[in-house]
Image (spheres, grey):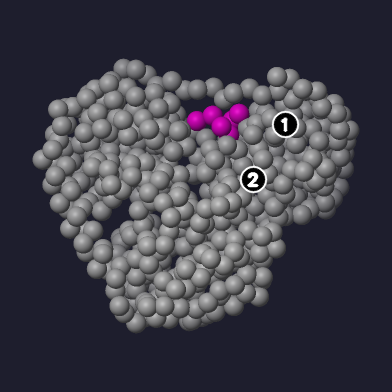
Amino acid sequence: MTETIEGHGGDLALAALRAYGVTEMFTLSGGHVFPLYDAAHRAGFPIYDVRHEQSAVFAAEAVAKLRRTPGLAVLTAGPGVTNGVSGLTSAFFNGSPVLVLGGRAPSFRWGSGSLQEIDHVPIVAPVTKHAATIGAASDIPAAIGAALRAALTPHRGPAFLDLPLEVVFSMASAEVDVAAADPIEPDPDEVSKAAALLARAEKPVIIAGSDVWAGDAVDALRAAAEALDVPVFTNGMGRGALPPGHRLAFSKARRAALKGADVVAVIGTPLDFRLGFGDFGSATVVHVVDAPSQRATHVTPAASPAGDLRTTLRGFADHPSGGHREWITGLRDAEDAAAATHAAEMAAETDPIKPSRVYGELRGILAPDAITIGDGGDFVSYAGRYLEPAQPGTWLDPGPYGCLGTGLGYAMGARVTYPDRQICVLMGDGAAGFSLMDAESLARQHLPVVIVVGNNGIWGLEKHPMRAMYGYDVAADLQPELRYDEVVRALGGAGETVAKAGDLAPALERAFASGVPYLVNVLTDPADAYPRSSNLA
């Protein structure tokens, strides 16, 4: 339905945003975007503000990831926009439909040296699906509609618009209309080809990622896996797509699965460093993506359907196999053996505390629908090893761009999205330096979350490899036993430091019961390094 709106640029923008399902704004105050605040204030549209613009974009991305609807960040001109570029880049790598509206110095005085005058569009264009400057107030609704359609069209991603000062402050009337993003239908022959490879395989494996959640294809994935009788591993927001108790759900036997598989189908996630760049030995590779742009170019899959993941997976379900009982039983044995090892690690009674023990205690406290947020390197790597989300769409991490500092922005977006769920941020002490000031933003706006810091006093993913390579390390140490809990307390929250494993569970229980931003500062073993090879190449 088309509606005519009259008002200043902020009124026109807000009407268009609401028409596309945007329900809140994340921002850091700036004069170039005052009309957007004015429109939101008069309409009762929620505004959440932060202490650094990257947190505003990360909060908007959390909303986009969790709700699968557009998230909105509003940034003032110049440094406001450039401070948000890491957030935009993460959203680009993650395929998150985020819209950033930026202020802009006035066009009528362009080139004269206005405050914060810089052309943002060339800066953000490489990391957005759509980037433009709006030329007139009457163009605002149509421009926002075009940007949001681009953001929501698979493969999803961020969009950027900036509004010159005289445009956003001007009065105008314009029509607000909504048009749906165009679906991408996969080639039926390519779907049948991929399905036949899986159906004929003797030792098939599925690896499903975030786009399965983003594309609302979780039920279709489950049906396809059950029809084909294929074990499923997951990463990103695909974790929990099959609940941990499902006979085809695996997480700990991935090495054995990929070593023995004859067909590996990777669905809704790129063939990047997290998956060995798609090199699965002699196995045939099937890469299922939501858009042709996501097909791997460094690997030649045997089949690569591109388009709506629900359609592709429903097509897979139409090609049932004869079953893979022996293969699945062998993997289950490997899974159970690894689980027994992990159980012992998670119960470790050591001094200093092993990161594994932290996750062992969290497993007993986190609810099935808790939102778990990873922001860190070494400490968060353990989270992926020991925590098993029970539901899809409950795991937030920085994704393949690997940007630290997502934590408290993601936490804000998660708390706004789910007022009644547990929100738990898992943060390395290095990552704490990027966003911990936004504990003040959470406390001031009554947004309680729990922050668990693994405090080993080092940059773990750098210190240990550098020592192995050179026999020494530099620029890899942090202040030992720093009281991050006291920082959060000073900012309006609460917290405590835990130095003994036996004190972890009571501390976590106090944190989740507190009703304020609460930081549990866990002194972990700096000698304990997550086992991995370098991700640099």
In reply to whether residue 152 is colored magenta, the answer given is: yes
Measured as percent of width and height from the top left, residue 339 is found at 23, 58
In this view, the residue in front, 264 or 359, is 359
Q: Principal SS element in the magenta part?
A: helix
Measured as percent of width and height from the top left, residue 324 is found at 15, 35
In reply to whether residue 213 is colored magenta, the answer given is: no
Q: Which residues are magenta?
A: 149-154
On the image, numbered disc 2 is attached to which residue? 123
At horizontal 41% and vertical 44% (from top left) the residue drawn is 392
155, above or below 35, in the image: above
Q: Quadrant of residue 190?
A: top left
367, above or below 528, in the image: above
Give the amino acid type for the residue marked by disc 1 in the picture: Ala
Is residue 105 visible from the viewing direction of this image? no
> Dividing the image into 4 quarters, which one contains the C terminus?
bottom left
At horizontal 64% and vertical 40% (from top left) the residue drawn is 99
Circles 1 and 2, Cβ within 8 Å, touching? The answer is no
106, above or below 532, in the image: above
- How packed mark 1 is, by other alpha carbons closer than 10 Å (few <14, some 14-19, many 20 or more), is many
Residue mark closest to the camera, 1 vs 2: 1
| SS at mark 2 in the image | helix
